[in-house]
Amino acid sequence: MNQKNFKNIYKSLLKNVATPIELYESILGQYFIGYADNLVFGKDTSAWARLYNPINSGVILHVNVWTVTDVSQSAFRAQFWFNATPPESDIKSALVTPSNLAVQPSPKAKVKLEYASNVTGDPTGGIKAFVRRAQPETTLVESENGKIIIGEGGNFLVFLSNPETSELLTSGRIAFGWWEESISNKCREDD
């Protein structure tokens, strides 16, 4: 079944208050997951991962869930920024996958999952929205249910550091789940 037929069938059947939005977006082939692994920080450096919605992507980013895991050597701080510029670094791109593997051809994410390790400095610009602190071997997780909405050219950045034990080198992982809403579909729905 091609993606257009798949979307049309399920769109008419499933968009209601009883269907979780994450399931609905996954059925449409618009839900994606990915993670940045081996994020190294400490010894006065930090690490970050972000969902970046490129200019002219044609989509609106809805952040659904984020996790910070596998930090085992030290207490850590996670800062959450909207539309900030991360410290200059060697930016890498993580692989992402659609959560619905039945849709063919397989949907491709327009939002990019980018990350960097051992960076110096802090994010600039944007808004530091909230901060979480955790002990070693603690998982931070939050379901945002799509309420963090990022337009083209914006990003949702998670910035990791260990300021209380900065002499320790540690590593961790940041994962995200999100969906992408077509701007052209949004405009048609509003007419």
Image (cartoon, rainbow, N blue to C red):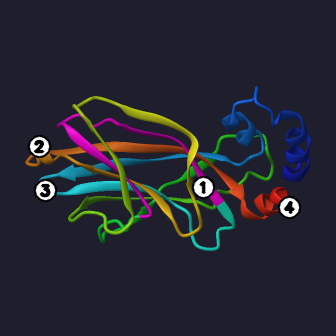
Q: Earlier in the sequence, mark 3 or mark 4?
A: 3
Q: Which residue is mark 2?
A: 164
Residue 14 picture location, percent across and down: 83, 34
Question: Which circle, 1 or 4, is nearer the viewer?
Answer: 4
Which amino acid lies under the numbered mark 2 shown in the image of this protein? Answer: Glu
Tell me whether the residue at label 2 lies in contact with that at label 3, contact meaning CB atoms closer than 8 angstroms. no
Q: On the image, numbered disc 1 is attached to which residue? A: 61
In the rendered view, tell whether residue 177 sits above or below residue 141: below
Q: Amino acid at mark 4?
A: Asp
Towards the viewer: 50 or 169: 50
Distance CA(mark 1)–CA(mark 2): 33 Å
Q: Which residue is mark 4?
A: 191
Which residue extends farthest left? Answer: 167
Q: CA distance from mark 4 to mark 2?
A: 52 Å
Q: Which residue is mark 3?
A: 44
- Please tell me how many numbered marks the rendered image carries: 4
